[in-house]
Amino acid sequence: MGDYVLYQPLTRADRITVLLYRAGVALAAVTLSALAAFLALHGPLDARTSSLYFDFFLAALYFSVGLSVFFIHLYIGIFKEYLKRLYYLALVTLALVVMKGNGDAASYVSGAHLALLFLLPAAGCMAFICAKEAFCFRLVEGYLLAIIMPLYLIALGAGALGEGAAAPGLVLIAALFDLFAFRKVLMPIHVDIGDKSAYR
């Protein structure tokens, strides 16, 4: 469990890595909100212009997740290694989606709903981060996000949710993630470091 005790003076590296980690969380929140707003206003991604926006949002989201994955502070090192491997898998599956769409991820995703399942590893990374923060700092919305985000992709990919439910579902996820990011970013920097003697 995280706490607010300052165990050791923070180094410059401590501060930079925490800021980069939180920048990833904040950028993910902004990206999800922008994508949710875009889908709510413009509907499903079927036009070339929409595809370009989706590809931009996707790139920004994967970049933000990568920032958080590589700069997260975890006491148990093996968890971070597994998280990195999951992110590498996410990059591979993203590359497959882009190749299948001939350079246009949105065209492949909108033409074959099962393609959304290729985005599950990235959702898994985000779910892990949310669950970790929820466990350490009692951010209840983190637990909700850890459950909802993968289930949302699975439901969309399996066709269990109609296209009309795609935008409202993403709006809910974005709103929860905004709350999560807001609460996380405002925490004192030292709480992400904790007791460095406990790292292994």
Image (cartoon, helix red, strand yellow):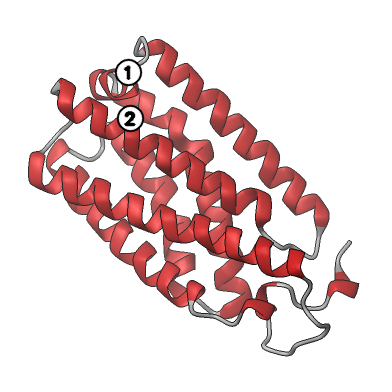
Across the whole image, how many numbered discs are drawn on residues?
2
Q: Circle 1 sits on which residue?
A: 104
SS at badge 1: loop
- Label 2 neighbourhood size at 10 Å, few (<14), some (14-19), many (20+)? some
Q: Nearer the viewer, residue 154 or 171?
A: 171
Residue 109, placed above or below residue 26: above
Dot 1 and dot 2 residues touching (CB under 8 Å):
yes
Quarter-of-image position of residue 6: bottom right
Quarter of the C terminus within the rendering: bottom right
Tell me the residue at 57%/24% (across/down). Answer: 92
Q: Amino acid at mark 1?
A: Asp
Q: Is residue 172 above or below residue 179?
A: above
In three-dimensional space, the C-alpha distance between marks 1 and 2, rounded to whole angstroms, equals 7 Å
Secondary structure of residue under mark 2: helix
- Residue name at image x 48 percent, y 17 percent: 96
- Image location of residue 5, percent across then percent down: 73, 90
Residue, disc 2: 55
In this image, 177 relative to 6: left or right? left
Q: Amino acid at mark 2?
A: Asp
Q: Residues within 10 Å of mark 1 (few under 14, many from 20)?
A: some
Sequence-wise first label, 1 or 2: 2
Question: Going by the image, does 24 lie left or right of 78?
Answer: left
**In this view, which residue lies farthest toward the bottom?**
5
Question: Do we see residue 158 in this rendering?
Answer: no
